[in-house]
């Protein structure tokens, strides 16, 4: 199913469920990148750039809330008359999957824009006595290369070369995102100035911030493709004979899981690039950077937990239908 078709269905057929996710996602995509741009160009140490992650995290939490309510409605629908029950199950399952797909897609885009925005100020507006940071560039290139090696090996071993055709555009899209986010980390590590040399904690925090933003963008991109596969599996199950539903569902979930694994594996590229770029600045961590690190860790954990909750909620309606 095409992305535009899905968006049309989400907006016009499941409006009350998905408009809130769409609004939250669009707001986060437009507003969240502004904070790292402002703090980067102003060279502010008081406001951590990772605070921008709160908006896409909110989008995911909204989708989790909708998913939980939808699963409850699917469970309750089993006690309704057969015709009405089938309609309620179909409507709520579609709303769960479409809301999750919208949230994962928009949050992925927001994290991508946040990472790109965080990478821009360092080379464009360096502080006094700015110069090329060979250690940072070398570390990001080496880290990104290691990330590519691990990702390629993980995909080959778990997904298999023969199954790559089944995931459709997920592999090239995620690979392109890995290139873009890896280059963003490299871009953020090109220049260093006198102030960053003296207080390397800020520089290290910035580069990790760009790398982790890319990691989250790619992880959620893989998750969006997973939910797309779940939507196709739901359509197949809804129209299939009863003796074929289990087989079609298992095959659809398996292919959807491949997309998740591809996105998660390629997410190691910007993450390792960010780690490699920040190694020269791990000493002299300032208090403001430590506060930002705590906030970033908290938001990172909430993002991962929200995604796992959303993925779990997308599977529960199928289990309820099979049990019923």
Image (cartoon, rainbow, N blue to C red):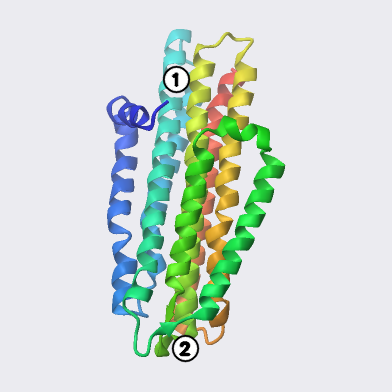
* Left or right of residue 262, residue 96 in this image: left
For residue 299, say whether it is visible. Answer: no
The residue pinned by badge 1 equals 90
Residue 149 percent location from the top left of the image = 65, 56
Tell me which residue sits at (49%, 72%) in the image: 293
Compared to residue 291, the image places residue 227 above or below, namely above
Residue at 49% x, 84% y: name it. Answer: 200
Q: Residue at x 49, y 25 (%)?
A: 232
Point out the image quarter for the N terminus. Answer: top left
Q: Is residue 234 above or below residue 172?
A: above
Q: Is residue 135 above or below residue 148?
A: below
Element on which disc 2 rests: helix
**Residue 84 % position (x, y):** 42, 12
Q: Residue 292: where, in percent of width, then height? A: 45, 73
Foreground tag (1 vs 2): 2
Indicate the quadrant containing the C terminus: top left, top right, bottom left or bottom right.
top right
Tell me if residue 199 can be seen: yes
State yes or no: discs 1 and 2 in contact (Cβ < 8 Å).
no
Q: CA distance from mark 1 to mark 2?
A: 59 Å
Q: Nearer the viewer, residue 75 or 271?
A: 271
Horizontal and vertical percent position of residue 13 = 31, 24
Instruction: Report which residue position mark 2 lands on.
Output: 197
Query: What residue lies at 68% left-to-right and 48% top-to-bottom?
Result: 154
- Mark 1 neighbour density, 10 Å: few (under 14) some (14–19) many (20 or more): some
Q: Nearer the viewer, residue 215 or 79?
A: 215
Q: What secondary structure is marked by label 1?
A: helix
């Amino acid at each position: 199913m095409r992305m535009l078709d899905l968006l049309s269905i989400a907006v016009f057929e499941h409006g009350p469920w998905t408009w809130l996710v769409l609004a939250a996602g669009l707001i986060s995509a437009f507003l969240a990148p502004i904070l790292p741009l402002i703090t980067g160009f102003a060279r502010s140490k008081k406001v951590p750039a990772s605070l921008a992650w709160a908006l896409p995290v909110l989008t995911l939490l909204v989708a989790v809330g909708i998913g939980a309510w939808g699963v409850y409605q699917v469970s309750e629908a089993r006690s309704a008359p057969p015709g009405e029950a089938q309609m309620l199950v179909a409507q709520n399952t579609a709303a769960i999957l479409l809301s999750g797909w919208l949230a994962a897609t928009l949050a992925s885009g927001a994290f991508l824009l946040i990472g790109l925005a965080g990478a821009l100020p360092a080379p464009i507006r360096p502080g006094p006595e700015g110069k090329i940071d060979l250690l940072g560039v070398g570390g990001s290139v080496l880290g990104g290369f290691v990330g590519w090696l691990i990702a390629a090996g993980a995909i080959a071993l778990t997904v298999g070369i023969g199954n790559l055709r089944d995931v459709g555009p997920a592999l090239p899209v995620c690979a392109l995102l890995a290139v873009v986010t890896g280059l963003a980390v490299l871009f953020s590590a090109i220049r260093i100035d006198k102030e960053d040399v003296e207080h390397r904690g800020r520089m290290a925090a910035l580069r990790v911030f760009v790398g982790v933003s890319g990691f989250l963008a790619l992880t959620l991109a893989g998750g969006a493709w997973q939910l797309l596969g779940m939507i196709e599996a739901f359509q197949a199950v809804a129209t299939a004979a009863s003796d074929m539903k289990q087989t079609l569902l298992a095959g659809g979930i398996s292919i959807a899981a491949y997309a998740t694994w591809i996105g998660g594996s390629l997410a190691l590229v910007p993450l390792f690039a960010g780690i490699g770029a920040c190694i020269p600045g791990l000493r002299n961590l300032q208090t403001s950077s430590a506060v930002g690190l705590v906030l970033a860790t908290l938001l990172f954990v909430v993002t991962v937990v929200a995604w796992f909750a959303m993925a779990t909620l997308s599977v529960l309606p199928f289990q309820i239908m099979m049990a019923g």
